[in-house]
């Protein structure tokens, strides 16, 4: 019998043995000065533990109120000493983030008050939550699948509007719905194939190679589309590794400071000012995040320190996903400028013709012969920088990305899709070479396996551990 039946046994999440016995607690807000801090508990004793450390004002208590209730009162320690006033939110299983009983104690923010509240909660019997354990429990209780959980993590770390839109789409299940559609096609195909192979005597509709090609090919194209969007998605999420390069004194550091909105690099009129690589994260418009690196001006030099700086600049130039090549509009192009142009030809580069506030001397056409995308601006006055974001979008083909569409969020997801795509390729080849339908079925099942792993429907504990380890404590 083929493996088709196995797939129908898959389920959304699993409970680990003993998992539901502990009640976990953690501070869910940043440890910093702020108006409100939240200590969150999840597990079967969540309400009971809160009741032990909290005196409500009024008759309503954590154990008697219905889910989604808020109770005002005071948190105290074991000796009855008041620690803080607080509002407790109660969620009753399964209608909570984790699927378990959850209590959130909102107390005054700041580092000390929240830590005190956490301490008494732990003394009352809760155990400290591991990184990502709340979301892990949500996954294990079938509240969300693995790609949705990863979306939660990406939302927390999103640095731009497009990144947070993409993460929210993942949290809402955009990727998993897409994957489910493809998986459904493959399951149907595998089931039909298996029925036909295993029960030739039954009245099963014959498998037409043409329709097989069509459904396998369709699934393959959808996986290809996901893989193609991966790099763009990653740039939006993680920021684009960007090097500012050029010969000395063209205004690289002035540009860095302008984009960063702060004085990050030292600017002087002495060529060779910058030696170290100076880095900052900068957002351009709603969706472009640049991980900027200002580098030393590239030139021949006898200064040993500057030499190291120039080497670092060359390295950055080679390893960056995007280069901003700066030229000085107020002087004719130098030998160093021309050498840089040659080196950058054909790479993802935006030429920045700087110092446009001064009379123009540089040969703009000559630059554009090698680097078609050119933005003329003055880093000193800020004039002309609006064009930068658009040029970057064009050079990196970022325009087409619709952040609400499913996007692969990380290497783990990509390798699952890749494995599935390769198995599908083998299935298509087996079919083309006229191999037995049994052989095709095996490949289709392998393809399905990759998709089930992506969603976490069939996934090893090690992978689950790895995913949630990357979360912060309290989420
Ligand atoms: N007029 C004008 N001057 C500029 C502009 N941008 C930079 N400068 C001046 O050019 C000089 C060099 O600027 P930097 O930003 O230090 O140049 P750099 O490319 O980082 O130089 P190195 O670090 O030495 O490689 C400084 O005197 C700046 O004030 C501009 O847009 N217009
Ligand atoms: Mg500099």
Image: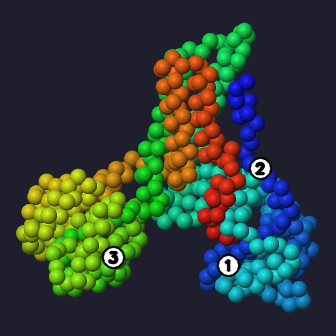
State left or right for residue 153 relative to residue 376: right
Q: Quadrant of residue 195?
A: top right
Mark 2 or mark 1, whichever is nearer to me: 2
**Residue visible at 13% across and 54% down?**
369
- Ranked by sequence position, the earlier of labels 2 and 1 is 2
Q: Which residue is mark 2?
A: 14
Q: Which numbered disc flags the more N-terminal residue, 1 or 3?
A: 1
Badge number at residue 36: 1
Label 2 sits on a secondary structure element that is loop
The label on residue 277 is 3
Image quadrant where one finds the C terminus: bottom right
Q: Quadrant of residue 273?
A: bottom left
Q: In the image shown, does 53 or 276 lie closer to the viewer?
A: 276
Q: CA distance from mark 3 to mark 2?
A: 48 Å
> Image check: 308 left or right of 27?
left
Pick the quarter of the image with the N terminus.
Answer: top right
**Residue, x 69% and y 60% (percent of image)?**
135
Q: Give the residue at x 24% y 74%.
A: 310
**CB under 8 Å between discs 1 and 3:** no
Taking the spot 64% from the left edge, 30% from the top edge, the residue there is: 187
Marks 3 and 2, the one that precedes in the sequence: 2
């Amino acid at each position: 019998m083929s493996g088709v039946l196995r797939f129908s046994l898959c389920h959304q999440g699993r409970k680990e043995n003993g998992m539901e016995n502990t009640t976990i607690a953690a501070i869910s807000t940043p440890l910093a000065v702020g108006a409100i801090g939240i200590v969150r508990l999840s597990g079967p004793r969540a309400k009971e533990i809160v009741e032990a450390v909290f005196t409500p004002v009024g008759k309503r208590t954590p154990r008697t109120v219905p889910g989604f209730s808020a109770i005002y009162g005071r948190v105290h320690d074991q000796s009855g000493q008041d620690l803080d006033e607080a509002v407790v939110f109660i969620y009753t299983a399964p209608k909570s983030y984790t699927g378990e009983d959850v209590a959130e104690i909102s107390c005054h923010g700041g580092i000390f008050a929240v830590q005190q509240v956490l301490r008494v909660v732990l003394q009352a019997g809760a155990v400290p939550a591991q990184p990502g354990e709340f979301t892990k429990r949500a996954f294990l209780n079938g509240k969300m699948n693995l790609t949705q959980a990863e979306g939660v993590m990406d939302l927390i770390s999103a640095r731009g509007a497009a990144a947070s839109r993409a993460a929210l789409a993942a949290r809402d299940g955009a990727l998993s719905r897409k994957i489910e559609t493809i998986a459904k096609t493959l399951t149907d195909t595998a089931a039909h194939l298996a029925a036909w192979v295993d029960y030739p005597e039954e009245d099963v509709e014959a498998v037409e190679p043409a329709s097989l090609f069509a459904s396998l090919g369709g699934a393959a194209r959808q996986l290809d589309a996901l893989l193609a969007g991966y790099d763009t998605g990653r740039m939006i999420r993680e920021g684009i590794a960007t090097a500012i390069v050029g010969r000395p004194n063209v205004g690289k550091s002035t540009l860095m400071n302008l984009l960063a909105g702060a004085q990050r690099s030292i600017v002087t009129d002495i060529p060779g000012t910058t030696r170290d690589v100076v880095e900052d994260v900068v957002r351009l418009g709603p969706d472009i995040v640049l991980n900027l690196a200002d580098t030393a001006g590239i030139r021949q030099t006898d200064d040993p320190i500057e030499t190291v700086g120039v080497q670092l600049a060359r390295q950055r130039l080679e390893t960056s996903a995007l280069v901003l090549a700066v030229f000085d509009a107020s002087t004719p192009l130098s030998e160093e400028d021309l050498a840089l142009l040659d080196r950058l030809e054909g790479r993802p580069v935006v030429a920045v013709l700087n110092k446009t506030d001064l009379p123009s001397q540089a040969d703009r056409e000559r630059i554009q012969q090698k680097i078609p995308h050119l933005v003329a601006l003055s880093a000193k006055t800020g004039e002309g920088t609006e064009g930068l974001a658009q040029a970057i979008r064009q050079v990196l083909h970022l325009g087409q990305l619709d952040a609400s569409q499913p996007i692969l969020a990380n290497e783990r997801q990509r390798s699952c899709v890749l494995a599935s795509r390769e198995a599908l390729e083998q299935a298509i080849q087996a079919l083309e070479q006229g191999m037995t339908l049994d052989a095709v079925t095996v490949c289709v099942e392998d393809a399905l396996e990759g998709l089930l792993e992506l969603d976490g429907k069939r996934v090893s504990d090690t992978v689950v551990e790895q995913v949630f380890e990357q979360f912060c404590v309290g989420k």
